[in-house]
Amino acid sequence: MKLFLNFMLVLLLFASSTGCNISNENTQVTEETIITYKALPLPDLFINIPENYQKTSSVFYEEYYICDDASIIITEDTREKQYISAYDYSVQALLEYKNMTSSLELQKNEEISTNQDFTMQTLEFNYTIGDGADSAKLTCLVGYLTDGFSMYIITCKANTDTYENHREEFLSVLRSAVISKN
């Protein structure tokens, strides 16, 4: 249930940055849910944000980055369990995304290497929030990286019609991820 609420928060942020409205009278946001995900600066994860992205905040995120219709959100799942597989986490995340969107079409599910030689699991997908003329068509590239104790999640998204203009910078952001070895 906690994971469901966390993804609802992500989708609400996506919708608010695209001008789309999502309403669900059954959605409850608890303080515990908001605390589960931490915005940068995370104590152990560092990434290179492109210079043209501006730092901003919202009700749900203390800090994230935007450029036109594109956004980069860095979160950390530190629930009390060990994370062995970023792949398994990504499969569960994809199911949650499917449950939260009007439509979802997976484009890629692959591993990439970061500049620090960590393996990052990625999902790349098109999705729609809402129906009809008010719907938002978005494309998302999400990277999942774990040190075994935390799952770091880097979510990059843009409107589907402009996504290709941002895709290389999104991949660069994902590949720049460095986990501190303190």
Image: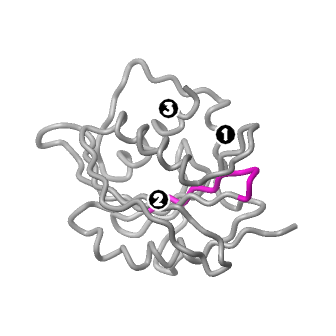
- Residue 97 at x, y = what percent? 39, 42
Q: Main secondary structure of the magenta part?
A: strand
Q: Which residue is mark 1?
A: 36
- At 54% from the left and 37% from the top, the residue drawn is 6
Q: Nearer the viewer, residue 107 or 127?
A: 107
Q: Earlier in the sequence, mark 1 or mark 3?
A: 3
Q: Earlier in the sequence, mark 3 or mark 2?
A: 3
Q: Earlier in the sequence, mark 2 or mark 1?
A: 1
Q: Alpha-carbon neighbours of circle 1 within 10 Å: few (<14), some, or many (≥20)?
A: some
- Residue 67 at x, y = what percent? 41, 69
Which amino acid type is marked by label 2? Answer: Val
Instruction: Please tell me whether residue 153 belongs to the stretch shown in magenta.
Output: yes
The numbered disc on residue 142 is 2
Q: Quadrant of the C terminus?
A: bottom right
Measured in 3D between alpha carbons, the distance from the residue under mark 1 to the one under mark 3, in whole angstroms, is 12 Å
Q: Of circles 1 and 3, which is in front?
A: 3
- Residue 56 at x, y = what percent? 53, 60
Q: Which residues are magenta?
A: 147-156
The numbered disc on residue 4 is 3
Measured in 3D between alpha carbons, the distance from the residue under mark 2 to the one under mark 1, in whole angstroms, is 18 Å
The numbered disc on residue 90 is none
